[in-house]
Amino acid sequence: MSFNITHLENEIIDQYLYDEHPTRPWIIGFSGGKDSTMLLQVVWNALKRIEPILLTRQIYVICNDTLVENPRIVKFINTTLRKIQKSANLNDFPIIVHETTPKLDDSFWVRLIGLGYPAPNKFYRWCTERLKIDPTTRFIKETASMNEEAIILLGTRSAESSNRAASIKKHEVKGQRLRKHLLPNVYVYAPIKDITTNELWQYLNQVPPPWGGNHKELVTLYRNANAGDCPLVIDDTTPSCGSSRFGCWTCTVVAKDKSMEGLIDNGEEWMQPLADIRNFLVETRDNPERYRQKERRNGTVKENLWGPYLFETRVEILRRILKAQKELEKTEGIELISHQEMVLIQFHWFRDLFFKTKVSEIYNKIYKYKFDMSKQEEKQKQESDLLRKSCKQEPKDVELIHNLLALQKTKTLKIKKRGLLDDIDSCIEQFIDESKEKKLSLSNDN
Ligand code: SF4
């Protein structure tokens, strides 16, 4: 190998064993791409050289799922994560795999279809923070506060791009391995920052993953998708997503989703309906006069500034997703939008006084099946009416309370993505209870 792997492993061992804070955990950002795979592999092989009795520092391998990740990549990453955890358990390695996901109210579809946010572009990229930065930040903050400090290990490399090189340089403290992160008591360690892309591929081609298997699938995915990594985005110092990388299949920040096109051209034709939906999202974003309201959410109208999607646009997007999902569920077992998201979308539609079409009607028409949301819809409508009545004097408070309710909503989606009807009930109950409490406290205040 053209670089000294033993030297790199020694450095990691040194950091693991002789850190001034013996208990602060390591958090390894893992995206399943080439950089974080090499990072985890090098750390793992370094740990193997440490006496088991000294392996006392906890290591978390965190992977963020935006819930609109490319399904082909999700399948690959999930298999890899399972292998990592299984092998870590078998070898008594202090590794815990943890997946982070966005809050329900921050999900891509709830924002886009429920609230009418336009598909993102590079000027209005509302998604990265909600889908990527916030979920990982929550985990990092919690881990750091439980252990007083934490170190994040990232697979960032200076060779990736000149911007990344500049960013790494800017945050580097000369002579020190760790740099301070923006979050309090959190540090960043980038062990493979000086590895070039050629060296990285050379390493992955020669050294099999210590958790079993080989890198054949990873190499094939890169080849077929003509893609780069979509790395774990933890803040604005890490490379950003949305530039022809593996990432959300819904991503409209890139002009063309080359990775999805590459996969389709290389035999994954079943992804064509996803590409069609993505292209439709681009169309809705680029033709505001046809697809968006003139009035913004705060009620103002300004020239050349468009409001959220028209209700008809939101209905059409949901219709297309469900149509594609119906096919993909049968052939690939893939779910594109969860029931929880649909319930919350309906909730937002009621709040926006959209009563013409209901989510369950669209669903039932496509599935020719009775998805009974009548109970939830009735409760949502009651809550919406209650809220508006209680805020008659101050209509602006409706939005305020809405935001407060959304803020209090901390459940993530993934944990309960399937078999959800009971959860839907309790989710709505919770919304109503919170709303009643708000109403009570508002009337007491008055
Ligand atoms: S990949 Fe695209 S859609 Fe996903 S968070 Fe990044 S910019 Fe947003």
Image: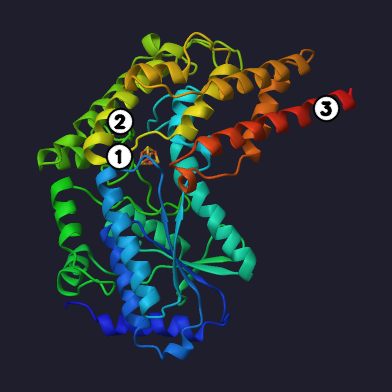
Q: Are marks 1 and 2 in contact (CB under 8 Å)?
A: yes
Give the residue type that dot 3 points to.
Answer: Leu
Residue that appears at 26% across and 42% down = 244
Residue that appears at 35% across and 88% down = 49
Give the residue type that dot 2 points to.
Answer: Gln
Q: Earlier in the sequence, mark 3 or mark 2?
A: 2
Q: What crowding class fits label 1: few (fewer than 14 Cα within 10 Å), some (14-19), or many (20 or more)? A: some
Which mark is on residue 325? 2
Label 1, label 3: how far apart the Cα atoms are: 43 Å
Which one is in front, 370 or 384?
A: 370
> Is residue 257 something that shows in the picture?
yes
Q: Are marks 1 and 3 in contact (CB under 8 Å)?
A: no
Which one is in front, 382 or 25?
A: 382
Q: Earlier in the sequence, mark 1 or mark 3?
A: 1
Which one is in front, 341 or 167?
A: 341
Residue that appears at 63% across and 66% down = 146
Q: Where does label 3 land, which residue?
A: 440
Q: Which quadrant does the C terminus fall into? A: top right
Q: Earlier in the sequence, mark 1 or mark 2?
A: 2
Q: Where does label 1 land, which residue?
A: 334
Question: Residue 151 at x, y = what percent?
Answer: 51, 69
The secondary element bearing badge 1 is classed as: loop
The secondary element bearing badge 3 is classed as: helix
